[in-house]
Structure formats: C-alpha cells, structure tokens
C-alpha cells in the first residue's frame, strides 16, 4: 500500500512516500480502507521530535490519527461491525498511522458513519471533536446557561467546542481574527472578540468555563475572566495551580482518550446537522501534499481542519 512515512525526525521534508505491506489485524481489530484523514498538531510535533520522550516510536513511522473509510476485513472477535461498513475513528496512537491506504483499528474505537456525512467531513472530526467533547462534557460538565470562553474558535478544536457548547445551551464567547468573525457567528458564537484589537480579559467576566487552546499568557489571563468556582481546561499545558487555588477554580490539562462510544454520540449530532466540521484546506495523499499540509498546520493560522484525501 502507499503510505507517507518518516525515517527520522526533522522538518516537513522528512515526509516521504513509500510502498509498504498492508497491516495485519488482531482479533479485536478491523482493517479500514481509508478514504480520508486529517492533520492535527500532534502529527508535526511527533515529526519534529518534540514528543520523542513521551511517545517513543521506532522508525519508520506513519503519522496521522484520524480515520474515515470502509471496513475491508474484521478480526475474529469483532461483533458490532461488518465488512463494507462506513466508519470513522481516532485510532490508538501507534506508529501505524493514517497517512496510508489502510489502517488497523480496535473495534471499541470505531463509530459508524451516517449516510449523509462524507468521508472528508468524517476525517475532520475524531481527534479534534473528541478533544472538544472531553473538555466540555467530561471535564467541565457544561450545562444550559453556562458562560463559556473558547480560545481560537476558528481552529479545529475551537470550532467543534463552540458547536458542542451551543448544543448544551451555553452562552459562548470566542477569540479569532476579524477575517473569521462571520464563521464564528455562523457556528453560534454570542460574543466575538478580535484578539488582534481587543483584550478578552478586559471585556469578559464571571465566566463558568474556559477552553484554553493557546497556553502561555492567554492561559494566565483566562483566570481573570472566570468566576470563583469556575473551570479551566487546557489542551496545551498544565494550568497554574496557585492561580487556580486563589479562586477555587477546577483547572487541568487533558490528553485525549480515544473513544468510539463518544464518537457515535458526535455522529448522531452530525447526522442531525447540529455539528458540522469546518474544512479549511484539502491536500492529496502524496509527499508534496503532506509536506504542504504540515507547513500550513505549523503556522497556527489554519482555518478549521486540514483534510488529506486518500480515495
């Protein structure tokens, strides 16, 4: 099968096209023929070697952890899926990733794909959608009437977080540049903040939840907008414990947990049109395509999700 691999850590030009064997599956896995995948920051962070101590893979590595496609083979213990099913998943973080024509996926990480959702749309969802869900639903227990601030609302996680918070009946503020104002309003944002011209910490107060996708000074300032007893959840760095203690704020960073059941819940909301992926760019499964996709993701200014079309 065709795959885009890395044989060493380094810049985007380390991504090279290779012809390798189709993976064999275990009893609890299915083999997914991939139609699309997407880019996430973890991809280029691993490629650059930033995470080599946390995630010690052996080369060659196939990056990519969003899968959308059709089941071609099922393991002997698989009971909920059959050959031919349209599925999507956030596969386990292994060196057999999704920049390839086939990927093995554990049954409990899979979700069936609604007929009215394309493979490109589905590929945009698993990692970013589950991250947003786990920030808001699992950690923050978002509920009707909550005031929620979501940083970088035009990004992958941010765009899903806005829609999930609105679905639960929250009032949502979000930061982005002026060029993305129309998009954020379309997603349901109640209060838009142009981060280039306005300081969110001067404008907002008494918020229940902050979803931090930026870290650093933005995370520090986010404590100012939270009410006593509020919640701050970060996807980039551990929050300052002293600041959290001062205002009795529940604060933590989360690392995504793959979860087919939660993905199925998100699929139901997609089927009803409640959640819609924002796709900013699409590239082919090729050396050049993946290199360009990584370079775009590394700018931190990609709108929505970057899709890799495989079939």
Image: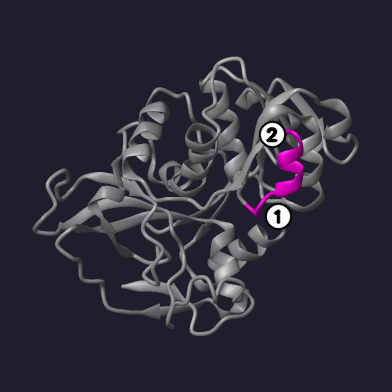
Is residue 25 part of the magenta span, yes or no?
no
Q: Is residue 237 magenta?
A: yes
Which residue occupies 17% across, 45% down?
81
Residue 246 to residue 57: above or below:
above
The residue labelled by disc 2 is: 248
Q: Is residue 115 left or right of residue 153?
A: left
Mark 2 vs mark 1, CA separation in Å: 32 Å
Whole-percent x and y of residue 149? Answer: 70, 31
Identify the residue shown where x is 60% and y is 37%.
159
The percent coordinates of residue 102 (x first, y second) are: 30, 64
Location of residue 198 with respect to 227 vertically, above or below: below
* Along the viewing direction, whichever of 240 and 297 lies nearer the viewer: 240
Residue 244's disc number: none
Q: Nearer the viewer, residue 139 or 43?
A: 139
**Mark on residue 300?**
1
Instruction: Tell me if 200 is positioned left or right of 139 in this view.
Output: right
Q: Which residues are magenta?
A: 236-248
């Amino acid at each position: 099968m065709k795959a885009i691999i890395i044989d060493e850590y380094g810049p985007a030009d380390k991504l090279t096209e290779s012809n390798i064997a189709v993976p064999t599956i275990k009893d609890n896995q299915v083999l997914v023929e991939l139609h699309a995948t997407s880019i996430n920051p973890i991809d280029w962070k691993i490629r650059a070697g930033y995470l080599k101590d946390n995630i010690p893979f052996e080369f060659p590595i196939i990056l990519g952890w969003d899968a959308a496609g059709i089941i071609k083979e099922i393991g002997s213990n698989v009971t909920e899926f059959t050959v031919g099913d349209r599925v999507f998943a956030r596969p386990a973080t292994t060196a057999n990733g999704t920049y390839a024509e086939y990927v093995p996926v554990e049954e409990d990480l899979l979700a069936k794909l609604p007929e009215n959702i394309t493979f490109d749309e589905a590929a945009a969802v698993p990692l970013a959608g589950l991250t947003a869900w786990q920030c808001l639903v699992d950690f923050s227990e978002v509920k009707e009437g909550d005031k929620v601030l979501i940083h970088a609302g035009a990004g992958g996680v941010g765009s899903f977080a806005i829609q999930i918070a609105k679905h639960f009946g929250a009032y949502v503020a979000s930061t982005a540049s002026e060029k993305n104002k129309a998009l954020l309003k379309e997603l349901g944002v109640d209060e838009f903040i142009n981060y280039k011209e306005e300081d969110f910490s001067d404008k907002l107060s008494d918020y229940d939840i902050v979803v931090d996708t930026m870290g650093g000074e933005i995370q520090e300032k986010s404590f100012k907008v939270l009410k006593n007893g509020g919640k701050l959840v970060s996807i980039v760095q551990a929050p300052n414990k002293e600041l959290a203690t001062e205002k009795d704020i529940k604060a933590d960073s989360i690392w995504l947990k793959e979860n087919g059941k939660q993905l199925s819940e998100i699929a139901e909301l997609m089927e009803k049109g409640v959640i819609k992926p924002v796709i900013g760019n699409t590239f082919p499964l090729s050396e050049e395509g993946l290199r360009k996709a990584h370079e775009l993701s590394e700018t931190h200014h990609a709108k929505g999700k970057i899709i890799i079309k495989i079939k």
